[in-house]
Amino acid sequence: MHKNQLAWRGQPPKAAIAWAAILFSFGLWNSAAWPQAVPQDPAVERGRKQFQQSCGFCHGPDATGARGPDLVRSPLVAHDVKGDKIGEVIRLGRPDKGMPPMPMSDEQVADIAAFLHARATEALESGSVPKSYPVEKLLTGNPEMGKVYFNGPGGCKNCHSPTGDLAAIATKFSPIELETRMLYPGGRGGRPIVTAVVTLPSGEQIQGPLVHADDFVVGLRDASGWYRSFSRNRVKVELRDPLTAHRELLDKLTQADVHNLFAYLQTLK
């Protein structure tokens, strides 16, 4: 037998127990410390508490809806950027829908926005929602009304076509993916590609994907792939955002419209 094994075997029971206690304590310390390796955003936790206190009685403590609508799949939340749209609704309310205005500080609005975006991301990336999510659980709208909205008040036909870019769309994506793409057209955490069109004093136009823009400079990649920047006070700049129409629709789009549109898209097979 090895010397070290003999030495360990010869230790009194109390020493062995002490070693076991140390190792056990070390294991507990590691298991307790491990979750702290990925700390939660404190703004999300503050927003959760603020939301439950101020909004949960109507929208549910987890924002999935109660008397008020579900905010996890809300188009307004999907298009919100750091509380710009959520804050307006909170402060002005929607009296016509029974929502009173609530005076809140910028910090409170930012925290609630962080919580709602975290909930939307969690739902979007949840591993518990299978690709074969039953369409019956989503298909609650009226496809005929969705078609009318698509071709009429919604203005969807101005950019999309059921025989063009949306042809057989329901066969390309599962129901949950299709509704996700409708509510989050920029993709999972992605941003749409904005095109910058720069008109020089000579009248020449240069356009390409926007790379940078501030109050003084605009930068883009031209058709040959080169990065080019221009002083904004010397040129005319037009930024074309493909999701502008979606954002302008937010004040008009209702939950019924969302479900009716989804029901219509589900018929495009």
Image (cartoon, helix red, strand yellow):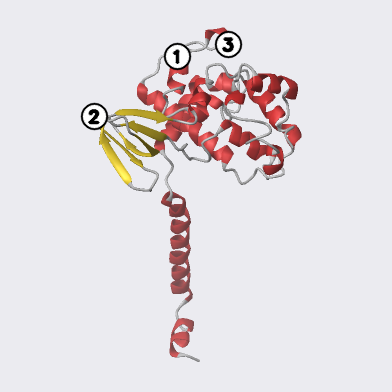
Q: Judge depth for marks 3 and 1 and give the one in front.
A: 3
Q: How crowded is mark 3: few (under 14 residues within 10 Å), some or many (20 or more)?
A: few
**Mark 2 secondary-structure assignment:** loop
Sequence-wise, which precedes: disc 3 or disc 2? 3
Sequence-wise, which precedes: disc 1 or disc 2? 1
CA gap between label 3 and label 1 equals 14 Å
Q: Residue 102 carries which label?
A: 1
Circle 1/circle 2 CB separation < 8 Å: no
Q: Nearer the viewer, residue 203 or 83?
A: 203
Residue of label 2: 234
Report the quarter where the C terminus lies. Answer: top right
Quadrant of the rendered image containing residue 81: top left
Is residue 256 in view from this perspective? no
Residue of label 3: 97
Against 252, residue 131 (above or below) is: below
CA gap between label 1 and label 2 equals 44 Å
Q: Position of residue 20 (x, y in %)?
A: 48, 68
Q: Position of residue 156 (x, y in %)?
A: 60, 24
Amino acid of disc 3? Lys
Circle 3/circle 1 CB separation < 8 Å: no
Q: Which mark is residue 205?
A: none
Q: Is residue 226 left or right of residue 174?
A: left
Q: Judge depth for marks 3 and 2 and give the one in front.
A: 2
Amino acid of disc 2? Arg
Is residue 48 in view from this perspective? yes
